[in-house]
Image (tube, rainbow, N blue to C red):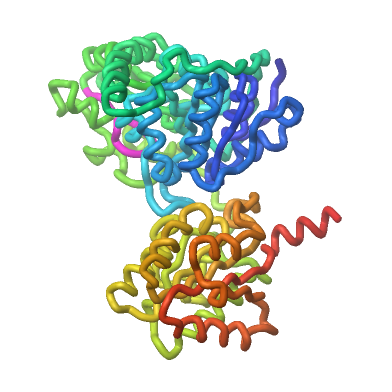
């Protein structure tokens, strides 16, 4: 046992390693990326051959984690909240198959959309799947939950979700570790049919899932993570979840909170504790980071809804992150006296790195579009999304991972020809390949530009599944070899690159241009190491 200074992400990773982890599966996405990166560089994980290789996307990651669980070992799968959308099919059905070895799904939410395209609360998914949720309020609790979550999973025969948010994921605190648990040995499920979701078996498994709900509720009632902290002023009771507890308590650093507080960090809701605070207090303030998930549940459970205030009532803003100042205002305290974070630097919009190859791709796109006008460039999730901003203004859409190719196809189907799809190498292998196959099958007139920087650049330079394979992948999907062109996006190559793009835009079928140049950041790190 020792004390370590860890990010919230790192605390989860270390807790899982110490808890008997055999394999971590993930796709990089802020704010979850550091979980896998910590495991990849952890000495114990390397020496004990814990699986720690990035997956092509979140769905394949989750399915691999299910496979390791099937074999009896403990697995963890990690992604950001929108990654859970990609993994949703496997996630939902894992609650029906159940598990063999413990399976923990970590979903990192991003309130206020610091680096995301939506503001989404993963607790809703876990409630939908009817599985337990653990929501730490501190780095220590993140470690403790990851350390014990595999045993909770195995005791219930269900996957367990750990839900964190950006501020906890990316802040540091001292963490006390615990004794190392051994990894599980290989052992197959006791029921040979458990993981075969034919309707007759799935119906039986679903009935089993329903039957486990009462046990899950009981475990929440006795969980050490759910605490009722009494207070003398019963005019208001406060229900907090996860990191919201910290935002509350930061207003009471030099004094005790006089209101009763119910801290909920394990779900389903501990209704006996809820009933107590409802019974004892005149009003209930629900403070939670994300959707008003608990607040809505309480309105369906408590008879007098007028006693409940929170995001739905306007006592707390409906969108964005909680802060100590917001909590102070909800408590009619002096918000100026709460712990405000000073602005130490003038904020500036994000921009592409100087020397980035995406800049040269933007230049040839803009030059090619001069005769057609705006509205024809469908882009995707990656560093190149910054082409939407000045001085480039080169792209017209960005919706979700992989949508560039399929949106370009749909626009071309509608008669918008030529249509351009811009996608990165990692995003292409994540979820662009199937869209390209659709376009090939229909011989749709679109030009796909894969801006290949040989890494997953936006999240810090993780391995990309398509590195040095993109030409062969496109050929395998049916793109004609003569219409797969590799270019090097440099200023000196501008004229020939523009000519190549213009030629392929005229082709009445699917063409792919692979603009290949190493990310300037990974190049700099590689040179520094050599």
Residue at position x 48%, y 43% in the image? 58
> Which is nearer the eye, 50 or 227?
50
> Which is nearer the eye, 520 or 327?
520
Reply above or below: 448 against 18: below
Look at the image and tell me in which quarter the C terminus lies.
bottom right
User: How far across and down, in percent of the image, does residue 67 sit?
Assistant: 51, 29
Residue at position x 36%, y 68% in the image? 442
Q: Quadrant of residue 93?
A: top left
Reply above or below: 5 against 322: above
User: How far across and down, in percent of the image, does residue 262 sit?
Assistant: 36, 19
Report whether residue 236 is seen: no
Residue range corresponding to the magenta coloring: 283-293
Residue 84 among magenta residues: no
Which residue extends farthest left? 303
User: How far across and down, in percent of the image, does residue 215 sit?
Assistant: 34, 11
Q: Is residue 472 left or right of residue 122?
A: right
Q: Is residue 153 left or right of residue 18?
A: left
Residue 287 among magenta residues: yes
> Which is nearer the eye, 133 or 166?
133
- The tally of labels here is 0
Residue at position x 67%, y 68% in the image? 517
Q: Is residue 429 left or right of residue 216?
A: right
> Which is nearer the eye, 222 or 328?
222
Which residue extends farthest right? 530
Look at the image and tell me in which quarter the N terminus lies.
top right
Reply above or below: 330 against 448: above
Report whether residue 100 is seen: yes
User: How far across and down, in percent of the image, does residue 18 sit?
Assistant: 64, 20
Q: Quadrant of residue 303?
A: top left
Residue at position x 62%, y 88% in the image? 495
């Amino acid at each position: 046992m020792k004390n370590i200074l860890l990010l919230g992400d790192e605390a989860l990773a270390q807790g899982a390693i110490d808890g008997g982890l055999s394999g971590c599966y993930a796709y990089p996405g802020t704010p979850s990326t550091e979980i896998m990166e910590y495991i990849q560089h952890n000495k114990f994980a390397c020496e004990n051959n814990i699986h720690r290789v990035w997956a092509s996307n979140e769905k394949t990651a989750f399915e691999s984690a299910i496979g390791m669980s099937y074999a009896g070992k403990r697995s963890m799968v990690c992604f950001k909240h929108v990654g859970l959308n990609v993994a949703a099919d496997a996630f939902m059905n894992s609650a029906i198959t159940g598990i063999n070895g413990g399976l923990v799904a970590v979903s990192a939410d991003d309130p206020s959309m610091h680096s995301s395209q939506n503001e989404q609360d993963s607790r809703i998914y876990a409630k939908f799947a009817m599985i337990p949720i653990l929501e730490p309020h501190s780095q220590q609790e993140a470690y403790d939950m990851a350390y014990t979550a595999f045993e909770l999973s195995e005791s219930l025969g269900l996957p367990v979700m750990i839900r964190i948010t950006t501020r906890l994921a990316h802040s540091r605190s001292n963490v006390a570790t615990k004794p190392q648990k051994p990894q599980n040995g290989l052992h197959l499920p006791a029921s040979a049919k458990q993981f075969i979701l034919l309707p007759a078996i799935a119906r039986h498994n679903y009935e089993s899932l329903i039957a486990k709900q009462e046990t899950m509720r009981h475990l929440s009632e006795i969980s050490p993570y759910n605490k009722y902290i009494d207070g003398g002023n019963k005019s208001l009771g406060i229900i907090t979840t996860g990191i919201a507890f910290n935002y509350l308590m930061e207003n009471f650093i030099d004094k005790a909170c006089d209101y009763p507080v119910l801290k909920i960090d394990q779900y389903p809701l501990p209704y006996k504790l809820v009933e107590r605070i409802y019974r004892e207090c005149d009003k209930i303030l629900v403070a939670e980071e994300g959707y008003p998930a608990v607040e809505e549940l309480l309105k369906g459970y408590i008879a007098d809804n007028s006693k409940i205030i929170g995001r739905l009532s306007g006592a707390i803003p409906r969108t964005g992150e909680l802060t100590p100042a917001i909590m102070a205002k909800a408590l009619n305290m002096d918000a100026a006296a709460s712990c405000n974070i000073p602005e130490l630097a003038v904020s500036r919009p994000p921009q592409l790195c100087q020397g980035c190859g995406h800049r040269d791709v933007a230049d040839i796109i803009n030059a090619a579009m001069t005769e057609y006008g705006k509205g024809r460039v469908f882009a995707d999730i990656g560093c190149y999304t910054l082409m939407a901003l000045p001085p480039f203004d080169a792209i017209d859409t960005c919706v979700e991972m992989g949508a560039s190719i399929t949106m370009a196809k749909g626009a071309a189907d509608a008669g918008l020809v030529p249509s351009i799809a811009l996608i990165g190498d990692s995003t292409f292998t994540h979820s662009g390949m199937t869209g390209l196959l659709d376009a090939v099958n229909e011989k749709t007139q679109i030009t796909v530009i894969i801006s290949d920087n040989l890494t997953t650049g936006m999240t810090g330079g993780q391995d990309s599944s398509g590195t040095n394979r993109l030409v062969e992948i496109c050929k395998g999907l049916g793109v004609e070899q003569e219409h797969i062109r590799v270019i090097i996006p440099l200023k000196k190559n501008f004229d020939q690159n523009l000519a190549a793009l213009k030629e392929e835009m005229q082709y009445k079928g699917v063409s792919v241009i692979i603009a290949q140049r190493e990310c300037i950041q990974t190049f700099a790190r590689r040179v520094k190491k050599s």
